[in-house]
Amino acid sequence: MKAEERGNTMSPAAPKIAGTVTVRRTLDSKCDNEPRGSVVKKRIRYKGYVIEAQANELRDGGFSVEFYLEEHDASGVTVTQFYVPSTFPTQEAAFEAAIQAGRQKIDMGFEKGSVVVNG
């Protein structure tokens, strides 16, 4: 997702809902807590939203995670990004935390179209 798409309404498209995707990217930083170069995504449907979790393997071990809540309607897609300020020992633990946090945000309500640190 491009930075300019975050929090904006986009034209409707047929979203990919289930599965895992690996995206490779090159990073110039040598910081120990930077991602190692791969991002794995997991997407699920929940109460009319799509939760997309992105786990990043860190250079010093463990995983960081962020998630996006997508609301699809007749006018397009509204995407809200959340950061989870923790690291996790496994990729699956990172996914579980992001999915749980996404469900909680949907259940409790959230400000749509923003970038939020979920602490």
Image (tube, helix red, strand yellow):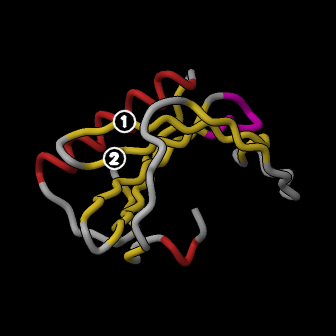
Callout 2 crowding tier (Cα within 10 Å): few <14, some 14–19, many ≥20? many
Marks 1/2 in contact by CB < 8 Å: the verdict is yes
> Which residue type does callout 2 highlight?
Val
Q: Which image quarter holds the N terminus? A: bottom right
Q: Where residue 79 sits: x, y (%)?
A: 38, 64
Residue identified by numbered label 2 = 50
Residue assigned mark 1: 44
Type of amino acid at the residue the image marks with label 1: Ile
Q: Which residues are magenta?
A: 56-61
Residue 86 painted magenta: no
**Marker disc for residue 55:** none
The mark that comes first in sequence, 1 or 2, is 1
Circle 1 SS class: strand
Of residues 55 and 6, the one nearer the viewer is 6
Q: Which residue is depicted at the point 56% across and 25% down?
A: 91
- As displayed, is residue 52 above or below residue 111? above
Q: Residue 39's quadrant in the figure?
A: top right
Depth check: give the residue in front, 33 or 94.
94
